[in-house]
Image: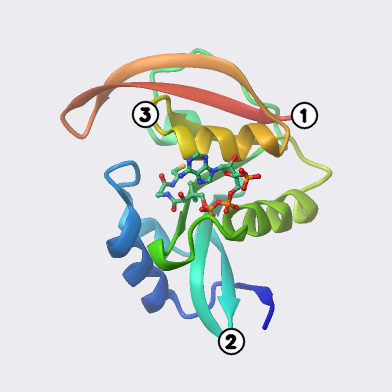
Amino acid sequence: MEYLIKKDYKLDKCIEIFENNHKNFVFDKNSITDPIYTKFVCTLDDEPIGYAVVYPHNDFLTREQFNCNYSPEDDSIYIWHIVVHSAHCGKGVGKFINNAILNEYKEHPIYCVVDKNNTPSLLLHNKQGFQIVAEFTQDFHGNMTTFALLKHD
Ligand SMILES: CC(C)(COP(=O)(O)OP(=O)(O)OC[C@H]1O[C@@H](n2cnc3c(N)ncnc32)[C@H](O)[C@@H]1OP(=O)(O)O)[C@@H](O)C(=O)NCCC(=O)NCCS
C-alpha cells in the first residue's frame, strides 16, 4: 500500500473529506469543483484520503479579498487549502501532498495563508520550509481572524 497523487481525481470523495475534517479552518468547499484550481489528491488503494487545492496564479490575495499589503511575484502560485481525512491524520499524508506540490511548482514562488490558531497546519508548513512573510487580521466568516502569509524558501 502506498500513497499516490492523482490530479483532479474523485472530487466527490474530496468533498466528503472536506465535510469530515475542515475544522472551521477551511470554508471554500466550492473550490474543490472549480476548474480554476488544481486539486492534488492523495490516494491509498485508489481511494482519496486527503487533498490540496492549488490556485496557480499570482492574484490570490486580491481574489480572496485578504487585507494583506504584500505583492507576490508574477509567477507565484498559492496553496489555497489542504485537508486530510481524520482517519489518516498524523501519518505523513499532508507532507506527501505538499511535497508533490513543491516538486510540481519548484520553479515558482509558492505561498499559502494559514490561520495563526491552526498549529498543525503552521507546523506542517514550517517543517517543509515555509516561512511567515506577512501577518494580517480581518473578519473571516464572522470571526476576527489573524492569518500568516507563508512563502516556501
Ligand atoms: C493540517 C493537516 C492537513 C495536516 O495533515 P497530516 O496528514 O495530519 O500531517 P502529517 O502527518 O503529514 O504531519 C506533518 C507535520 O505536520 C505537523 N502536524 C500534523 N498534525 C499535527 C497536530 N495535530 N499537532 C501538531 N502538529 C501537527 C507536524 O509537524 C508533522 O510533522 P511530524 O510528523 O514530523 O511531527 C491536517 O491536520 C488537517 O486536515 N487539518 C484540518 C484542516 C486544516 O486545518 N487544513 C489546513 C488549512 S490551510
Label located before the other in sequence (2 or 3): 2
CA distance separating discs 2 and 3: 38 Å
Q: Which residue is mark 2?
A: 45
Residue on which disc 1 sits: 153
Q: Determine the secondary structure under disc 3.
A: loop
- Specify the quadrant that holds the N terminus: bottom right
- Residue 9: x and y in percent read 53, 78
Identify the residue at image location x=37%, y=77%. Answer: 12
Residue drawn at 39 percent across, 77 percent down: 13
Question: In 3D space, how far apart are the residues under numbered discs 3 and 1 (Cα atoms)?
Answer: 25 Å
Q: Is residue 58 visible?
A: no
Q: Residue 120, relative to residue 43: is it above or below?
A: above
Quadrant of the rendered structure where residue 83 is?
bottom left
Image position of 2 (left or right of 44) = right
Q: Position of residue 138 (x, y in %)?
A: 30, 18
Q: Nearer the viewer, residue 34 or 23?
A: 23
Give the residue type that dot 1 points to.
Asp
Say left or right for 11 vs 102: left
The image shows a total of numbered marks equal to: 3
Q: Nearer the viewer, residue 105 or 152?
A: 152
Q: Amino acid at mark 3?
A: Gln
Question: Which of the 4 quarters of the picture holds residue 153?
Answer: top right
Q: Residue at x 60, y 20 (%)?
A: 132
Q: Is residue 135 visible?
A: yes
**Does the Cβ of the disc 1 residue fall within 8 Å of ligand 1?**
no
Name which residue type carries label 2.
Answer: Asp
Marks 2,1: beta carbons within 8 A: no
Q: On the rendered structure, is 116 left or right of 144?
A: right
Q: For the residue with label 3, is its CB less than 8 Å from the closest atom of ligand 1?
A: no
